Structure formats: C-alpha cells, structure tokens
Image: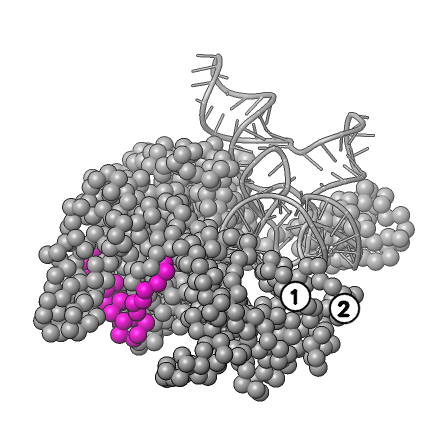
Amino acid sequence: MADTTHPALDVYDAAAIEKKWQARWERDGTNHTDVESGVRPYYTLMMFPYPSAEGLHVGNLFAFTGNDIHGRFQRMHGHTVFEPMGYDAFGIHSENYALKVGVNPMELIPRNIANFRRQLKRAGLMIDWRYELSTTDAAYYKWTQWLFLQLYKRGLAYKKRAAVNWCPNDKTVLANEQVIAGECERCGAKVEQRLLEQWFFRITDYAGRLLENLGHLDWSESTKAAQRNWIGKSEGAEILFRVEDFLELAGAATVVTSGTSESPAIAPDVRVFTTRADTIFGATYLVLAPEHPLVDRITSDEERASVQAYRERTAKQDVVSRKVTKEKTGAFTGAYALNPATGKPIPIWIADYVLMEYGTGAIMAVPGHDERDFEFATTFGLPIPRVVANAGDDEHTPLTAPYTDSADPARLVNSDRFSGLPVSEAKLAIVAWLEDHHRARRVVNYRLHDWCISRQRYWGPPIPVIYCDHCGTVPVPEKDLPVELPHVDDFRPDDSGISPLARVESWFRVNCPTCGRDARRETDVSDTFLDSAWYFLRYPSAHRHDVPFDATLTDRWLPVDSYIGGNEHAVLHMLYSRFITMVLHDAGLLPFEEPFARFRAHGTIVRDGAKMSKSRGNVVNPDEYIDEWGADSFRTYLMFLGPYEEGGDFQDRGISGVKRFLDRLWSSTVEAQRSGDADATTMRKLHKTIRKVSEDIPRLSYNTAIAAMMEYMKVLRAGERTPHLNEVEPLIQLAAPFAPHIAEELWSRLGHTRSVFDSGWPAFDADLAADELVTVAVQVNGKTRGTIQISPDAEQNTALAGALADQNIARFVTSDPARVIFVKGRLLNIVVK
RNA sequence: GCCCGGGUGGCGGAAUUGGUUGACGCAGAGGACUCAAAAUCCUCCGGCCUCACGGCCUUGCGGGUUCGAGUCCCGCCCCGGGCACCA
C-alpha cells in the first residue's frame, strides 16, 4: 500500500481510514514510548482490565478513552507519554468461567487476551504494546511472589488461624472487602464463618499513614472519602476496670497452684475502648465479646454453664448475621468489675454485639447514652442512669431513649466534680484524671483489618512458602522463584478448605531449601488484589527479567502522573496499592510512598437510563458500534454523553450528532484546501475555542470541550464562505485526542508528513480572541430587562447611557437610580426605589 | 444513623464559580434541494398570557442573605454510591 493512497477522495470513510492509520502507527512505531530517555516523561495509567470471555466492556472503553485523550493531549504538549496496557487475568472470575466451560484457564486466558487486544487496537488507543503484561505470566508473578517474600522478611506477612469469610459457592475464603452486605461479591451466596490457617498482611500497621497521606493526594474526593470510611479512625481511650472479688470468684485453691507468670492471683483488669470517656459515671456494666480470653477466668461457677452455652451459640453463628442481627442477647458471667470513676461494682456480661476484632473486645456499657447499650439494658432490665443532659434537661430528667448528642449544649450531670462540663471538655478531663491513676490512656483505633491474602483456589500465584517438619515455615529462596503454577486437569475447589493444588503431590512435595529433607509447599495461592497492587511498577520495567522494577526507570516514570479508573476499586485495589508502595518505600526500594500522584474516578455509563446488564440485554458491544460508526465517532460520543467523572446515559440516537460533527470536520478541510478567506469573527471564535478546549481537557471536562468545538464548527460553516486553512488546521489538532484517526488523515492531507500528535498544540492568542463588542445584560431591580452591545472595556457611564437609551429598559426606570451596579463586560443593574 | 455525589426543558446535559438559566447534542416542528426518498443545508423549539412590542412564572420543597441566588446559609424531601451492633 502506497502512503499517498487515500481511501476515498472526498468522503469520510471511517472504516478505511481507521484501518489505514492503525497500520501506519504500528509500522512507524508512532505509539512507541522512549521509556529509557524520552524527555518530560508523563505516565498516564488506566486500571487494567480483567480479560473476560465476553470481551471489552464499554465501561472499559470509556475509561481507556478518557485516559487516552489526556495522554495524547500531554504528548501534544511535548511530553513523552507512556500509556501501557495489561491484563489482570488471575482470580476467581476467570477460574469460575473456566470451570463453567470446562477448559483450563491456562488455555482460556490467552484467547480472551487476544480478543481484548484486538478490540483495544480498534479503539485507536495510544498504547505502546511492547510493554504489555499479564499477571498470569510467570515472568510477572515471579515478582508477585518476590513481593510476598519482602513482606515476609519484614514481618508483615504472618499466618494465623482465623475466623474467615467462607463462600460456600465459590468454596473459598473472601477478604472482608469482598463481602458485600453479608454476601459474596462474586456470586451473591451467603457467606459463612470458618476457621482456617491463613496468610495475612499487616496493613493495619499502616492505617495511620494510609489515612494521613490522603490529606495531600490529588484524588477524586469520593475516592478519598471511601478510603477514610474504610480505614475508620476513631479516637478515644482505653480504660481499665478491675475485676472485683477475683480471688473468691476464681477459688483460692486454683490461684495458688497455677500462680505462674500469668499470675492469676492478681485480679485481672478488663481493658475497654471508648470514645465517650465522659460518660463513665453512667457505665453500669461491662460487656466482653463472647470470645474474649478473660471470660473463662472470671466466670463464676454458677454462671459457667449458661456462659458456655451462649459462647457456643455465637461461635456457630456466621460472621454476617451476627453483625446484622440487632436483637440484643447475652449472658451474665457472675463477675463484677469496679467502675474506676464511681468505685462501685458493676456486672460483667458477654454479648455478641461486642466484637473481638475491634478495640479491646470489651466495652463499658453506658445505656443512657448509647443506643446499643440502651437496648441491651432494656432487654435485661439493667439501670439506665443519666450522665449527660441537653439544654432543657437536668440530672433528674428520665431517659426514655438514649441521648447520644455530644455537641455543644450537652453537659455532664450526675458525674461528681465533672458535672456541668461540656462533653468535649469532660472527655479530656476524665481521661486525664484516670490517667493520673494509671487507669486510662488515650488511644486511636481503626476499623481496618489485616489483609487476608490466602485463597484456597487454583488460578493464582502459589504463595512461595515451604513447610518443613524440622525447619518450620521456610520462605522459598528468591533464586528459586517463580514457583510455577502447574497445569492441573482437575482444578475444581472442594469443601475441604484446601486448595486444588494440594491434590498434586508431584508439585507440592519438595525438599526443604534449608535442610534438604522432605517438605511440602504451601498450596494456597494469593489474592488477585496482590497482583494488581504493584503492576504500575512493572510496566516501565516490563523488559527487565532480573529485577521487578528497575531503579532508574522507576525514578523516571513513577509515581504515576495520572491514574484513571472506576470507583469500585476505590477501597480494595487503591488501598492495597498504596500499602504495598509504602512497604517497598520503607524497605528502601522506592523513593516515594504514594503510587498515584493524581487519580480521577470516572463515572459509570448506563444505557437508556438503566444499568447495563446481560440479563437486561442492554449491554453495549463496542465492536458493533465501531463497525457501524467508526472508532472516532464512538470514542467522541462516549466522551460527549456526560461529564467524564459522572458518566452518563448511552442512547443510540445520540451518536449521530458526533458523527455529523466529524463529517463536517472532513468537508470543511476538503473545502479549505480549495483556498478560502480568513475571517476575523471566525478567528476570534477559533481562539476562544482553543482556550476552552485547552482548559477543559486537563480537567477531564471532555463533554464541554467537544461542545466548544461543535460551536466553533457552526461559526466556521456559517454563511456561504469557504473556510480558510488557518481556521481548520488548529481544529484538527484540537479534535485529534478525541478522534485520532480522522485527525491524522486530514492532517496528512494538508501536506504534513509527521503525525498530528507530534505537531504540538495550537497556541491561544488573547488578542485574537478579544471581542470588539460584548453583550451586557441590563437589569432593573435585579430583573433582566434587556441587553446592550458595548465595548468590552466601556465604563459604567457609557453602559448606563446605552441602557437608558433603550425604551424597554427606560420604562422600568421610574425614578432616579438609587444605586447602580456594574460588572464590566457582563452586567448592569439599575436599582430604583 | 454517618460520609461522599447528585436533583435544571420531551431526553442527555451547559452555566465564566454570585451576574442574561437552558450552551452543545438528540428527539420534534417547519422550510430549501429532489420526480420522490435518504443524505445535506436553513429556521423554530421550557411553561402560561399576548395579534404583536412585551409581560409573568420556572433550576426537588420551605425559609434566609444579597442590588442580584441553579450557585452561598438554615431546615427538609428524593435518587446514586461508600461505611455501619466499630463502642
């Protein structure tokens, strides 16, 4: 094919020119990034897709196109832009599909990827395909396993037996993040509780930093808010309650014989966490989580049977319904503790509304000022004293409902010498007072849990650990990585809670790397979120086989300059990525601790007002639309249908407007080639458009940028005149990020030999954009009564004179103006009495 | 319950961040071209009143601040998303 051959002479043939330019870009390496030494590197990243069998989703394309426009815009501003693509191909989703069709994901995934690649190439994205990666390649997951080892080395990976979320349908453990309202995020099955040995990452060690750093990240507010919620910081105090009459309770004999380091002879303290230390005078009982380790020691003989029964009952209950059920149940332990504020004994109960995982697993119950405690006290007939009063109340006003306000008018009552203090002051004063007696300290708690990364499944990177009877848990030496995932015919999970890999003896039987004796591999694989928690580090170094990420390249390209993705990953993926980055930073392997300098969450696309779903049959298949309208129209329409960060409504009819715009761009260029005259009005509009588009693209305000170009198109084509080349050329450049193929085609037809993406960005000239006359709105008493045309820098007097010359305006000015407000070039408001 | 978004014509959505509400597009109406249709091009297009000039109303609801409020403040209602027996 000769370069000079144009697919059609004067008609915009999208299919032909898109094919032509995709081939050209590939041949010329137009989209190649000089990763080693390109000037002003700019890393635009989009969340990599899971390559499903259904093919590319419009949601993906919406995200990628938005990112691509931003990247192309940066390139036209002289940056070396790196826009890589990869596949998040491990995980339950792929595996379940593979099970359904009965084909090993090792065969399935490459097919899906090939289809994705084909679709992505049709969309005309500025991807450097030489850096493509898949998390399922051993060359990639070798380093995912390496990452595990780094965390292990630093004491951040540990194994514990824990009650975990078990999905009976997918037959695997789920992270808390993957349980939505008590159901499996993937399949919707009701999640159960199971006790299994699991690997965890100590993300809770980083809770404070993960929260703190959010303050200075340039991210979508919604994403930051979601992370804040998830981390769930709460500031309060831990207070010690001494168990009363402990010796009597435990029985003197027991105490003497078992007087070890545990020293049961000393009455134990119950440590509680509270954010309302101010209400301590109203704490009339304590509640421990049923699993609390102290329960056995303090339970009296009379209550032992009922306490035991209650504990067994809760243990059987699944994690979910325990948290959702609001009815208060519990059992009295027979023990009492001393309230350190009042010095009075209060009963100790156990109840499932207190969770062992949060705080200290024990609370001081203040039924008067906490809804849950109020319910509990009501159920069991416990006293409900008032220790906080509102403006109209006093210490005698009975409580018919819990009073939980802590804002201003609320003051302490019935609280000894603290009575009368506002809540916030009382909090500090009471904690300080108890602190002096070593009965309290200020504490910060987080809702965040450690990250469970074990999966009893097949389709993931094996966790690189070996168990040896002599040496214990031995991490696989780095030189032995990757621990390759074997091809297994029967990869179905079962109820055993053990990974399918445990059935492959030839694979898991190994020699201990330390002592050489018989040992066995860990048969669990790691969570997919670990794969995606570091992929952005891999892209620039995708060609390096000796290191996960090259120091020089990393320094050049990271942190990511612009990250775009869906808010469905606001918590999981984005939080884990930040955590992993911080860990690597602390290990001295990265110079920064936040991976994404700027993040914008894109919105979701619905169709005809309804969420797209297979069952509803309203899923947009990109291939069909690209076939019918061309990628340029499709891309531009996706960007036009709503504000990028909010998404929008995909309506089939709407795409024609965008297509018409591109048609007109085409014919205007063709016409302009047959000469034409430059025109001041058009130039003025052109420069206004350049300014608008240049401002809108960095803000991801793509819909208004396109609207601005359409507006310009109207002016350009107004009347009988033929447009001038100087009026059209810059428009081609402005449109190029949105519709790259047609832009390249028209650009080359105008005689340019280099890509439009290397042509720079049209300059905005304020002088050329300046209006000769502006329309000023004239109001009388704030109501618009007309407009006047005046010079943009005309003063108030001129404007007023002009306004009063207008009959319709003048008739509302019934007396001398009491006041005149003038906003230059905008508005004149005449105020009359 | 708490935390983020959002509510503007028949529809998708604009609005210089306190200054002419409805840009741009879709749908609709009328017209030009055509034997005709498609395509293309032009005009109109929030509601009510008026022959018209023009007037009144209108940004979820109710108040307020201001010369002026879609935009700011107070109190509500509804929709989408996140968190939630987290002490």
In the picture of the structure, the residue carrying the numbered disc 1 is A383
Q: Residue at position x 15%, y 46% from top?
A: A489
* Region in magenta: A137-164
Q: Is residue A619 left or right of residue A590?
A: right
Q: Is residue A337 magenta?
A: no
Q: Is residue A818 visible?
A: yes
Depicted A401 relative to depicted A737: above or below: below
**Residue hosting label 2:** A396
- Quadrant in which the N terminus of chain A is drawn: top left
Query: Residue A510's x, y, as percent?
Result: 11, 64
Tag 2: amino acid: His
Where does residue A593 sit, x and y in percent of width and height? 38, 71
Q: SS at mark 1?
A: loop
**Of callouts 2 and 1, the N-terminal one:** 1
Residue A664 in which image quadrant: top left
Please say whether residue A161 is one of the residues in the magenta stretch.
yes
Q: Nearer the viewer, residue A238 or A187?
A: A238
